Image: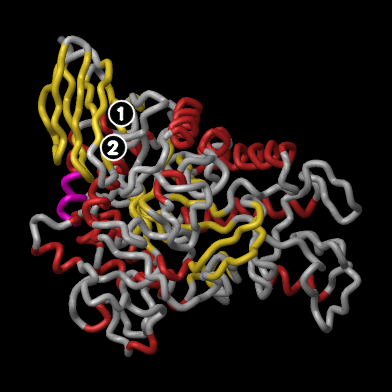
Amino acid sequence: MRSNSWLKDAIIYQVYPQTFQDSNGDGIGDFQGLVRRLDYIQELGVDVIWLNPCFDSPFGDAGYDIRDFYKIAPRYGDEADLSDLVEAAHARGIKVILDLVAGHTSMDNPWFLEEAANPKSPEANRYIWKNRDFDPKLGPKKGDFVSNFFWYQPALNFGYAVPTEAWQDSVDAPGPQKNRAELRRIMAYWFDRGCDGFRVDMAGAMVKPSDPQALAETIRLWQEMRVWIDATYPDKLLFAEWSHPVQAINAGFDLDFIMHFNVPGYPSLFFNGVGAIPNKEGPCYFDREGRGSLEVFRKAYSEQLDGTRGQGFVSLPVANHDFQRLRCGARSWDELRCAWVFFMTQAGPPTIYYGEEIGMRYVEDAPAKEGSTLQGITAANAGTLDLGERAGTRTPMQWDDSDNAGFSTASESELYLPIDSDPERPTVAKQEADPNSLLHFVRELVRLRKSHPALGSEGSYTILNPVEQSYPMVYMRELNGLRYLIALNPSAVRQSISLAVDGSLGEFLLNQGCQWAGGQGMLRVDVERFSYSIVEVQTE
């Protein structure tokens, strides 16, 4: 285990800074607004905040197109405001992770402008130029350079594993080596200012093209960075947007997410046909009709856990900025509670996307904003995407029933995105006042996870269902002789299952609609609709 083994007990909270809390009335969230809400985040039980990109940007892709890696985007404040945030978070025992877009920039980044002004210079090697014969006065066009994701995000040159064209550099050429050195300088700059680490965007797509040889070189690149970090900043974290934990953690990352690409399984659990990423593979497992399957997730998740144990951590996020929120379509509050029990008893640090703890919904009619629409985009690490509107999962945090839900004092027309117009929208204030709310339920689940280590990241994880029976889901968590069974029925259909389990039932940590019976090596559980249970198993 790397030096950051404390991460095994952590709860991660993802903040989309544009829409979390506005402190100056301009309609856009900022660092000082986040400072005002740190007590709320601390009370949730959070140990790590991850911020989406906050560096200077033209915001063609909501900050993932960086103009200056060494400057804070003015909409969020300045470097002093970030220092205030880091200091205030650290005072509460919370670490701050920034988002690092390591593989590309915006077209108005000074590096790109300098090379575009003199494309035939031998020093014009920070980017991958396919065509250097364009008129510098007119500037490059789409196709003159290699890009990542949107065409106007020129890819930084980390080389080609096996160059096949004259314009392709090897990984040890001057341009790729220049960028590796710059990457270290960027990380060191923010480490020195108190940042506790980075979540790296598109971390698995650095070396070109997208093939096994390039993957091996990308892994070697990050291993090189890890050696440098461990020697120079040994307490700093690296999270990957890779969605293949075995690869990412082998590359030197502390944590990787399983999401909507690469390793399968997440969509088969939660994507119900509504939102930014429709599930084209049939009904999901958390489907009220009980028509889903566990098998894709079971196989993929167990492979990733087995391949990373003792080295790093696997996180299943409760939504994120790129796909729909958990509450989308017709998914009910009872279904949300069942899903939360699942998320908080998995074998890796939970990652909570802001607002999920109060059940904010995916807003289907949200207007497009700053590259939120992804129809037909080709991503280097995800193939061709055919997605819906991401803005629906980025709407402002709903704090109370005051104007703009307490997010901002700006006029409604000045808001970064509109507040959810649903008159029944949940707010923190309402749920604080209701002891039976989802917010209080989530806080209790966090407390249970932290007070019972077998439910955490180090405990073993085994799904007990036979292949032919997917409902209800029953799995075992075990650590140091302590064992817990978790049963989940995310459907509206009553279910039952019998399982061979040595031991007898002990203390119930949580139980809603589950009836357990049996003994002598065989247990049976009958489950009502949208039910869940966490129960200790005692050795006989």
Task: Between residue 297 and residue 228, name the one nearer to us.
Answer: 297
Q: Amino acid at mark 2?
A: Thr
Q: Position of residue 231 (x, y in %)?
A: 53, 37
Give the residue displayed 57% in from the left and 76% down from the top.
58
Q: Which mark is residue 475?
A: 1
Q: Which mark is residue 231?
A: none
Drawn side of residue 185 relative to residue 362, left or right = right
User: Which residues make up the magenta segment?
Assistant: 439-446
Is residue 306 highlighted in magenta?
A: no
**Label 2's element?**
loop
**Could you say which disc has been placed on residue 345 in the image?**
2
Residue 80 visible: no
Please tell me in which quadrant of the rendered image residue 29 appears.
Answer: bottom left
72, 220: nearer the viewer: 220
Distance of mark 2 from mark 1, alpha carbons? 10 Å
Is 442 covered by the magenta stretch?
yes
